[in-house]
Image (spheres, helix red, strand yellow):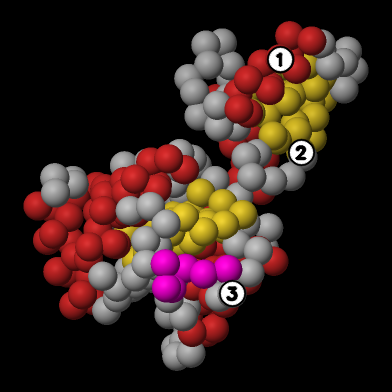
Amino acid sequence: MKRGTLDRLLADWRAHRELVLATDLESGEQRLLEPDAAEQGTDAGLLAAAREALRRDQCARLEHSGRQLFLQPWSLPLRMIVVGAVHVAQPLAAMAALADYAVTIVDPRQAFATAERFPGVTLVGDWPDEALRTLALDARTAVVTLAHDPKLDDPALAVALRSPAFYVGALGSKKTHAARLERLRALGLSEAELARIHAPVGLDVGARSPAEIALSILAEITQRLRKPAP
């Protein structure tokens, strides 16, 4: 890899931008693709293949313009930000860690967000909107609000819905969610932004216990990550 290519790769990584390294298998020529940017002179089909490689987190080989190309995705690490150190957050943090997410629990209530309840998990005691801004949400971040308290959940959602986070979910019934939407509209969020919320959070699998609810949440996040809606 040429020094200039490596320097750009590292710079974009630090700036939370995903890239795909395209290598010509015959000539060895390499090029970095930024699939979410409108790259002048880049074929739409090649960009689509690069986006698919990033989505799958898998290398790919394809023929393009008579050349054999090898696509290597440089995806950002997966992160899950959970607002509310409640009972459901405990199994969710453990399951998410097994699925290779770096988990952060955000809750200013120090009695709930303790190392004893969340061993090995990053705990942030700042107010949720401040915490999420500091955490710099990117396209590989999932945000789940579980506090079931508008004072905590609403500020977090207002930040998350205006970020590149690939998943935003909120705990609560349909009635609770309807009231939540009205509050968020009053904060100036658009209908398009509100439509991003997965609520009630998690796939409808009939979950009852905290562990089952956590399982349904992680399943929905996985579905959104691996099989995004067209």
Is tag 2's residue or tag 3's residue first in the polypeptide sequence? 2
**Which residue is the site of mark 1?**
7
Q: Residue furthest left?
A: 186
Q: Are there few (<14), some (14-19), or many (20+) residues within 10 Å of tag 1?
A: few
- Does residue 134 sit above or below 212 in this rendering? above
Magenta residues (range): 110-115
- Does residue 90 sit above or below 4 in this rendering? below
Rounded to the nearest angstrom, the CA distance separating label 2 from label 3 is: 43 Å
What residue is drawn where x is 17% and y is 69%?
178
Position in image of residue 34 (x %, y %): 58, 24
- Does residue 139 sit above or below 71 in this rendering? below
Q: Magenta span has 11? A: no
Mark drawn on residue 60 = 2
**Could you tell whether 158 is left or right of 84 in the image?**
left
> Circle 3 — which element?
loop
Position in image of residue 61 (x %, y %): 79, 35
* Mark 1: amino acid: Asp
**Could you tell whether 208 is left or right of 76 in the image?**
left
Q: Quadrant of the N terminus?
A: top right
Q: Nearer the observer, disc 2 or disc 3? A: 3
Position in image of residue 28 (x %, y %): 87, 15
Q: Are there few (<14), some (14-19), or many (20+) residues within 10 Å of tag 3?
A: few
Q: Nearer the observer, disc 1 or disc 2? A: 1
* Mark 3: amino acid: Glu
Q: Nearer the observer, disc 3 or disc 1? A: 3
> Circle 2 — which element?
strand
What residue is drawn where x is 21% and y is 75%?
176
Badge 3 vs badge 1, beta-carbon distance below 8 Å: no
Is tag 3's residue or tag 1's residue first in the polypeptide sequence? 1
* Mark 2: amino acid: Ala
Q: Considering the whole magenta stretch, tell me its main secondary structure.
A: loop
